[in-house]
Image (cartoon, grey):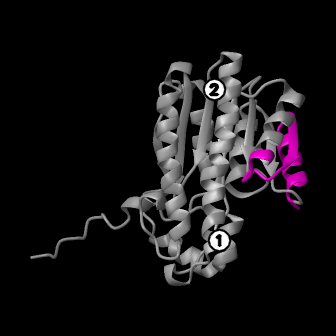
Amino acid sequence: MKLKDKIAIVTGGARGIGLGCALELAKAGAAVTLVDRPGSEELAAAAETIRATGVDCLAVEADTFSREGCEKAVADTIARFGTVDILVGVPAYNRRASFLEYDAADFEGILKSALLGSFHMGQLVARHFVEKGKPGKITFISSVLARVPNARCLAYSAAKAGLNSMMATMAVELFEHHINVNVIEPGWIDTPGERHHYDEETMAAEARKLPWGRLGTPEDIGKAALYLSSDDADYVTGTLLPVDGGYRLKHCRNIPEEST
């Protein structure tokens, strides 16, 4: 129960990586505010899943791509629990298309999600930490694609690279307040979003090509988020933590030498 009596906000928490992170925090004892888009069909069920671990869970419908939505998420959490100790930001919006065909509105929307939404949530939660004079934990979910170019992921890669840079600057500015700010970079994770793009056969075939022989799971990312949200990571800040089963290095494996 490393997070007993802690209060966590998880954005994008109704499914996939967001729910995976929220579950691991909850199993470690944290009460959780799950935030998802207005009209989310999955939020209520996700909140019940969190409560089934034995902790309290507040479900908040809010557009965390906007300042107003982020303010609502933080204000509702403080009204319910009295404080915030942990933020796990999961900006999950994406659209895939080639560069020459990429829709400008989609590009702006993805930047708004990963950069502006993370700025708003991060600033509001950090201000609360400073106001209360206490340390805190902020973790953003980025992607290995911030550093590994991938076709048809132009906006996503650019937004996540910007998120990485923003995280590092936030970490530097928050040193004096002992607020840990870090990023997790997932590799290829088996989420509902991925299954929207690929069928079961394709995903299974691609998983076998990865160094670990499988796709990652939301639980894999959740365990990393738990670590960074706990006192175990007190001395960790400004860090990019890849959780990718070797995805970044998949082309670096040894080629067997020809027998002579």
Given the current orientation, which residue lies at the most extreme left position? 260
* Amino acid bearing label 2: Gly
Residue ID at (61%, 74%)? 104
The image shows residue 218, relative to residue 74, as above or below, that is below
Quadrant location of residue 210? bottom left
Res. 1 visible in picture = no
Give how far across and how far down residue 76 sits, in percent.
86, 36
- Residue 127: where, in percent of width, then height? 67, 28
Around disc 1, counting alpha carbons within 10 Å, would you say few (fewer than 14), some (14 to 19), or many (20 or more)? some
In the image, what residue occupies the spot 79% across and 25% down? Answer: 83
Q: Residue furthest bottom?
A: 101
Give the residues in magenta. 40-68
Image quadrant occupied by the N terminus:
top right
Quarter where residue 95 is shown? bottom right
> From what the image shows, is residue 148 above or below residue 133?
below
> Disc 1 marks which residue?
106
Q: Badge 2 local density, few (<14 within 10 Å), some, or many (20+)?
A: many
Q: Quadrant of the C terminus?
A: bottom left
Residue appearing at x 74%, y 26% in the figure: 6
The spot of residue 197 in percent (x, y) is: 65, 77
Tell me, yes or no, whether the highlighted magenta stretch contains residue 87.
Answer: no
* Disc number for residue 136: 2
Q: Between residues 200 and 168, which one lies in front from this camera angle?
A: 168
